[in-house]
Image: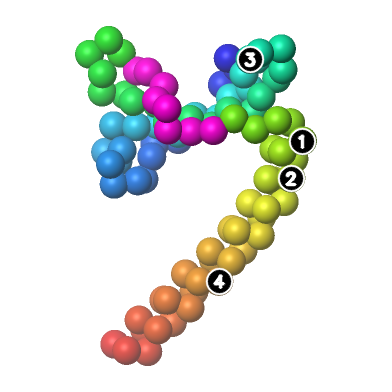
Amino acid sequence: MKEIWRTVSMERKWKDGKGHVVLSVQPYSGRVWVDMRMHNMHREEGPTHTRNGFRLSIEQAEEMVNAMQVAITKGKEERERNERKREESS
């Protein structure tokens, strides 16, 4: 496994350093996969990956990059709308 990126999870169940989101490249079953998985950081035997995650082919990951850009843009727009509503109601 070649780890590419790691960040502390912000999800309620995994926050406060209990879980890390890890992006890696993983050879498996004769293919190379892009793997994104939750790692449990609070196990007695040390940090371990969980079943919470997914594997994508290289082609799927390329498609996902474009979809992530769209999702990020839409998420920012939604956040701005919510902030404006809060400011207007204050």
Q: Quarter of the image holding residue 29?
A: top right
Q: Which residues are magenta?
A: 47-54
Q: How many marks?
A: 4
Q: Quarter of the image holding residue 60?
A: top right
Q: Which residue is mark 2?
A: 63
Q: Residues within 10 Å of mark 2 (few under 14, many from 20)?
A: few
Q: Residues within 10 Å of mark 3 (few under 14, many from 20)?
A: few
The answer to whether residue 30 shows anywhere in this view is: yes
User: Is 50 contained in the magenta span?
Assistant: yes
Q: Which residue is mark 1?
A: 59
Going by the numbered disc 3, the residue's amino acid type is Tyr
Residue 77 marker: 4
Who comes first in sequence, dot 1 or dot 4? 1
The picture places residue 63, in percent across and down from the top left corner, at 74, 45
- Residue at figure coordinates x 33%, y 25% from the top left: 40
Q: Distance between the Cα atoms at labels 2 and 4?
A: 22 Å
Going by the numbered disc 4, the residue's amino acid type is Glu
Who comes first in sequence, dot 3 or dot 1? 3
Q: Secondary structure at mark 3?
A: strand
